[in-house]
Image: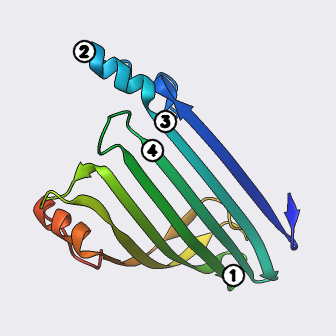
Amino acid sequence: SEVLGGNNRATLQYGKGLMNDYSQGGNLMATSVDAAKERNKQKNYRFTNQFVHSPCDNMDVMWILIYQKTQNGKAVNNNSNWVSLGARPIYYFSDYVAIEGELGLDKTNDSTVSSVDSKSRAGTLFKATVAPQLRLGRGLFNRPSVRLFATYASWSDNFTRDANRWGNADNIG
């Protein structure tokens, strides 16, 4: 819908039981009666809002907000929350050359999975990307484009411990 000279799209999703992960077939495997009962109690709520705006002729910006709450159906350690905020501006030098950036912040609080030190996985991730590109015309969603990009990411200590255990916690990639 038209909002402030741009386009806004909001979605609200709800899934329960087999459809809690919004997939076509769901997770059909239940290894026991108790697992089947837990699966039937699983719930997932997701809200997204995306706003695309063109503040001037040579620039587009996309803003996004995502909130998701997942319940795994177990009696304890059963909640996961995720919030993601981001902005993706693109500046067009011409119809074929542009530079795009992205800033994002994600915050999670997940009691369903333990980190390396047995604490619940909770923390934040910040990311910043810059991407000069060649493209076939203007427009945020216009494709194809060829990009060269660099990303900086920084995450909280709890995530860093897990990443070190899995073998890669560098901030530049």
Marks 4 and 3 close (CB-CB < 8 Å): yes
Sequence order check, earlier mark of 2 and 3:
2
Q: Which residue is mark 1?
A: 92
Reading the image, the residue beneath label 2 is 32
**Callout in the foreground (2, 1):** 2
In-front residue for pair 43/91: 43
Determine which residue is flagged by label 3: 43
Give the residue pinned by disc 4: 70
Q: Secondary structure at mark 1?
A: strand
Amino acid type at circle 1 is Tyr
- Give the residue displayed 33% in from the left and 69% down from the top: 123
Disc 1 and disc 3: Cα gap in Å? Answer: 43 Å
Q: Quadrant of residue 34?
A: top left
- Which part of the image, by quadrant, shows the N terminus? bottom right
- Relative vertical location of residue 102 with respect to residue 52 in this rendering, above or below: below
The reply to whether callout 1 and callout 3 are in contact (CB within 8 Å) is: no
Please report contact status of discs 4 and 1: CB closer than 8 Å, yes or no: no
**Residue ID at (50%, 40%):** 44
Image height of 77 relative to 62, above or below: above
Q: Position of residue 57 (x, y in %)?
A: 82, 82
